[in-house]
Image (cartoon, rainbow, N blue to C red):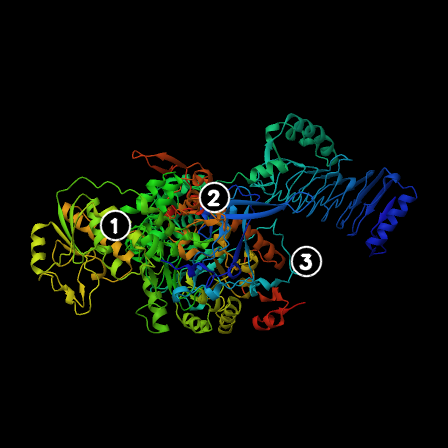
Amino acid sequence: MNIEGTIDGRRIPSRVLEETVQAAIKDGAKELVIKAQGQHGIGGRIWPKYGPIKITASGPIGQRVGAMGMFGTEIVVDGGASDDVGWLNCGATITVLGDVTNGAHNAGAQGTLYVQGGGGARCDTMTKQNPRFEPLQSWYFRDVGDSFAEFKAGGIAVVCGVTPRHPDNILGYRPCVGMVGGTIYFRGSTKGYSDKDVQLLDLTEQDWQWLTENMKPYLEAIKRTDHLGELTKDKGDWQKLVAYTPAEKKNLAGKRMSARDFRRQHWEKEVGKGGIFADMVEETFTLAPYITTGKNRRQKPLWQNEEKLAPCVAACPAGIPSHKRYQLLRDNKQSEALRLVLEYSPLPASICGELCPNLCMKACSRKLLDKALDIKGLGKLSGEVTPPEPCQNTGRKVAVIGSGPAGLAAAWQLTLLGHQVTVYEGKEQLGGKLLTAVDQDKLASTILQRDLARITTTFTCKTGVTVDNKLLAKLCTDNDGIIIACGAQDKEGKGLSFLTTGINHAKGKIKVNEMGQTDELKVFAVGDVISRGLATHAIGSGRRGADALSSLMMGNDYQAEKRETIAYKQLNLVYYEAGQTPASLADEAQRCVSCGSCRDCHLCESACYHNAITRRGTENGEFEYIVDEQKCIGCGFCAGICPCGVWIMSDNP
Amino acid sequence: MESAGRLDHNGELSLLEFPYIIRWREDRCTRCGKCTAVCPTKAIEPSAMVQRIIQSDGATPLPDTIRRVSHIIRQVCDIDRHCVGCGTCSLVCPNMAIVPEYNPNHKFLFHKNRGGVPYKRGGRRNDPATSTIDKLKFTRISMLTDPALDAGRHEFHIRTLMGRIPPAESLQMRTEGNRLYLAEDGFIPPVREIFPIRIGGMSIGALSPPMWEGMAMGVAYLNEVENIPVVMCSGEGGLPPRLLKSRYLKYFIPQIASGYFGWDEIIHALPDMIEDPAAIEIKYGQGAKPGDGGLLMAYKVLKLIAKIRGVPMYVDLASPPTHQTKYSIEEAVAKMIQSVSMAWGFRVPVYPKISGTKTALAVLNNLARNPYAAALTIDGEDGATGAAFNVSMDKMGHPIASNLRDCYLELVKQGKQNELPLFAAGGVGKDGHLAANAAALIMLGASGVDIGRYILQAAAGCFGDEKNRCNLCNLGKCPRGITTQDPRLYKRLNADHVAERVVDVFKSAEVELKKIFAPLGRSTQLPIGMSDALAVTDQAIADRLKISYVC
């Protein structure tokens, strides 16, 4: 049946032509010959139930010839065709005996397109692959235009490359962008394709078999069988482009040059080994972890046992280490504990136990939790202890002028240090202001006498002897050192008239340096005559003056107490239960916080996650806790949880 | 000796005054101490805690007291050791037992001025609100009208020009036959074609060696491997001689600022340079701290920095707010541009950078008249810094959007919008929308944008945010190793990884820019000033920026 696109010199609309074709098919026509006049979509949408149908079209063919073509439809275009030949082809076989322009087989899914010439731009784009059907085939005899096979998802395209328009690039500019499926066989050269989407491969035997088998009917259809030999001569003339699988693509994406390779192969070759800063730093730029040990720690723990003063010690004018007494008690060394005080004060029962307002107890850390330890009670208990043995006799002689608490403390201290001491007291009895200025209510004479009795046998006492200029001068000659402890004076300093010229004083006070030394090298002054205070202050002053004088006489360096006091916040009181009444001295000793002094409780050792802390005994029978620098990360757990504040974290430069 | 009174809570701050509160889970903690070992401010510390439970198990009241002392991680209520919320503790915790939580009711600024010293920090303006540039939408989507492009398929040439482009008629040319030649004393200003997102000036010193080198390597990679011509400004602190003498110098913009740090080394290296730098930036101001100068704190001035900058170690390095020896805008700009251009034989674009300011137009007009001025960079208030007073960062400066827009429209008025490129900075990518922010600024009139903090966040995992998280840059305690000179910290940072991330950032930004430009039908020319593509749902912003209001 012949159908004319032009009737009576007038072009019929595409709609009318389509209606005419559909009506003819319904009437049973099997072969249509259409003389077109640019009508759109010729030959499509003929349902297979009417087939097989053969349509031969000629004349100016409109766009989308064979669009939505179906199985059973065969279309032959006698001459070239316009855009979108075989658009959304669903099975038709379309032969174009000429060129196709842009968009041939765009979105095609099934069927076959045979092109006798070449293709325009964007041919074989968006093609599909439906597993229910055989794949789409698109055959181009010459070459194809730009943007070929974009987003191709299926089907086989063959570009034979015979007398191409662009012999150096038969697939056009940038083919295969976004291509995810299907195969392109081509013969000739290409100037590139989207290499992130597809790969170029040689044909396999299977490919070659398919190509050579299907080449013949194609060439027959386009009337070019004379090229069969040339096109099927050599598998090596052909190549194929196939889409990467998603897995291959992923692999490909990860295959960009690593920065490490860039650094080694490019960067360092240009700027020098080690990079741009290598000539300016000593350290190499190696990676380090966030958690570091050894010298790379930000801070390191230090076991500072006894490096800071317990508040009680710092508060005591006499510097009595009460915390050590409690440590001895905890160690079941009761007599040592009670005797320890005698190394600091000759009159513990009188002063600590009675007269002193006990500044130690006011400062006691335990007060933060409940109440201070009973250090006063400890003083009282020390009234009956036996005194320690003095050191070996040094042969040095010292005169102490005055037998108040300062003078007695100095005399006692010097005696313990092995010096030969003579105390000069103007009155008939020893004791100074303890006798003259203290009520019996405050200090029973029995207690004082007991304290005095313990010490007065250890040095010579000359009571009732008033020291004047002459005697002082003599004492200076006869002795290696003098301690003046003549007590508080009035502002005129009348009582200081015995002083020789070298010893300066003003307003009733003898001028001394921080060691208690007067302007005469070997003459020291202690107690109220240099600075008024409690009896306890006098004890401390006497002890320090004695220590300083002893150092001078023995040629040693005098070590004044310079330690800082531990801060309360460094202590951890949570380990102690508040409010309990101690049943015994041993219980009381357990209450002591042991500020700044290691209790040897092993808490740090247990808490250290990294096992960096070890306790070890030392040669002198003591112990210490040490840190393995290679294990410690500087977390501060030891310092944070130590009950005694012994561990501190120090910056690790 | 301290008195017992000090142990009471008088004068102590409560945890609720602090900006971040540590949530610690006792049930998960192993007491390994990793969190306290890394906390940059020592805001947490191990401690002991006692708990008391009274139980009565039987059928009658029969109390039993259980006392339990355990070890905990305690937050310190000390303003000098405040938790900055960086989350390094969470990072290293093996059991997810610890995390800082933002406390919106904090009173941090009421207290952070101990000793009469105002609060200093790094980072940018602490304002988590959406910035104007982030509010702009791209509402011109061509489907059937302009030829819409496909970002995934079409080829794009996303490039901009850095350098002055004088109108053809102003060039002094002569003809010979039918060919054009530059006249004897004619001058064609140098121009570079670059990617429109640059890495803005961050100095060696402000940044650690691996951070700076990682970025530099990433930039070289982008140029050499990916063909994306990204350039990077040195910041004020010089460049290492090895880089100055390398081929890669062409990807870098050395910065000269009021401190002139490192410039003697740059000048010494001049005869050995085998490439010209991409441009020279003259810094007059910085968006993060307008009116204030640079400051590199002494504890960041270690050996390397001292060497590169040519200064003694362990001294505070101040760049004054203004350049010395310049007494008027005419003199300042002309003098600087002339002398720096001269160093490279007028082959290198030289441009000034100013902070966003109401006086930007005055600077612009001055530059418009100066034939050697290659561009103008304006750094808006959301720019970040390594160290500044909080007041400068939070309250000073000008938002970039209207500042840039005013300048662009002024150029349009003078017919010079294609002649003098504007670069915009300050808050680009603040909320992570790098390409969108860049595109918005381009459509408002910028030829390109600078990023700073964004790249630190994206490439090196900088913890900082606009709720003042971390922002320890000024103290050299950066837990990521980005803004520190302490080897113990900067060794945490892998320069290769930084480089890789820089490449990721620019590659993906390029794709996103394509996605934005494709619907405009733009593939080869940036839509500079193409403000009809922009819209905003805020009428006031629309009016001010002269863009359309949509709702």
Find residue A111 and report its horizontal and vertical position in percent: 76, 38
Image: B541 above or below A64: below
- In this orientation, which residue lies closer to the viewer: A178 or B89? B89
Q: Is residue A587 visible?
A: yes
- In this orientation, which residue lies closer to the viewer: B530 or B545? B545
Identify the residue position indicated by label 2 in the image: B34
**Pair 3/2: label in front:** 2
Q: Residues within 10 Å of mark 1 (few under 14, many from 20)?
A: some
**Pair 3/1: label in front:** 1
The answer to whether dots 3 and 1 both sit on one chain is: no
Residue, far right: A27
Amino acid type, callout 3: Met
With A426 as the anchor, is A606 left or right in this view?
right
- In this orientation, which residue lies closer to the viewer: B139 or B121? B121
Find residue A537 and report its horizontal and vertical position in percent: 27, 57
Identify the residue position indicated by label 1 in the image: A452
With A428 as the anchor, is A184 left or right in this view?
right
Callout 3 secondary element: loop
CB atoms of marks 2 and 1 within 8 Å: no
Callout 2 secondary element: helix
Q: Which numbered dot is residue B286?
A: none
Image: A222 above or below A409: above
The answer to whether dots 3 and 2 both sit on one chain is: yes
**Pair 2/1: label in front:** 1
Earlier in the chain: of badge 3 and badge 2, it is: 2
Identify the residue position indicated by label 3 in the image: B143
What residue is shown at x 13% (from left), y 63% (from top)?
Answer: A504
Between the C-alphas of marks 3 and 2, the distance is 57 Å
Amino acid type, callout 2: Lys
